[in-house]
Amino acid sequence: MMGAAVMDASIGAASAIHHAASARLAVWRHRAGVRSSALDELAEEVPVALEYNGVSHAVMLATPCDLEQFALGFSLSEGIVASPAEFYDVEIEHGAAGITAHIDIAAGAFMRLKERRRSLAGRTGCGLCGVDSLAQVVRPLVFLAPGQPLSGAAIRRALLEARGRQPLNRLTGATHAALWCGRDGVPHMVFEDVGRHNALDKLIGGLHAGHADLGDGFVLITSRASVEMVQKAATVGIAAMVAISAPTALAVRTAQACGLTLVAFARGDDFTAYAHGANIDMETA
């Protein structure tokens, strides 16, 4: 009886755990040679295990918010499910060691996943995580149908408005953001995470959950444009990406090959088109 009571208490304690997006810690600040004590707000990064039909597939370090969108977006951008229709449900479980996303997917999608025999181990700064052959690094992508032309005015407006749409980064200074912007540059959706890939996956999940028209806008990312960012966007049908920082050469070649319009070094009034620059409307640039 006592053992059962202890077990019940342990289960209750575990179920009461909830990971916040940030934590306030005591620090010593040094300014102009003067030291003072202060409280600083820091972004949390928590291990998030993604389980598909009861089988562990990936563990990523992520900001512990918007995890339902993260699970859907990761599943789509990694090609685990071909469409949201194959993504049945997700249950988020907080525990002392981290968070588990229990994901229920269609039998066909689960069979494809098992055939891939991949085991991922993610880090917030990682590139491609845990692929087990060189052939998996650059996966084949369907050539994207051209979306609506981008305009320089829309890019500049998105950059300007993005500054006020990142509350967690404003609080901690440690997170990336991925924003979905309309053709006029107005951000309609934004997600933040300590990992740039995670922020994009959260956005992809949010877009599909909201049945957004992916041909009627573009993604703005507050990070560099690496190949996996291009791959994730192209896999789900996003035809245009704007990055604040630099692209990699492999990202540019991948964008050129799959038809994704790639703009980078987008800061203030300036930007550089690296792939399919003809899709930028110069009359409104």
Image: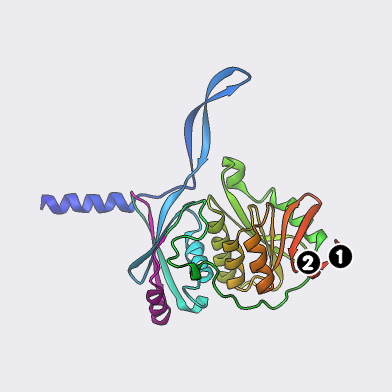
Seen at 61% across and 71% down, the residue is: 234
Residue 124: give x, y in percent of width and height.
Answer: 50, 51
Q: For residue 264, say whether it is visible.
A: yes
Quadrant of residue 252 within the rendered picture = bottom right
**Colouring mode (rainbow / by chain / secondary structure / one colour):** rainbow
Q: Is residue 32 left or right of residue 186?
A: left
Disc 2 on helix, strand or loop?
helix
Q: Amino acid at mark 2?
A: Gly
Mark 1 surroundings within 10 Å by alpha-carbon count, few (fewer than 14), some (14 through 19), many (20 or more): few
The answer to if 109 sits in the magenta stretch is: yes
Disc 1 on helix, strand or loop?
helix
Which residue corresponds to mark 2?
277
Q: Can you say whether 39 is above or below 97 in the image?
A: above
Which of 109/122 is in front? 122
Residue 136: give x, y in percent of width and height.
Answer: 49, 69
Q: Can you say whether 274 is above or below 98 in the image?
A: below
- Quadrant of the image for the C terminus? bottom right
Quadrant of residue 206 within the rendered picture = bottom right
Q: CA distance from mark 1 to mark 2?
A: 10 Å
Q: Nearer the viewer, mark 1 or mark 2?
A: 2
Magenta residue span = 97-120
Which circle marks residue 282 in the picture?
Answer: 1
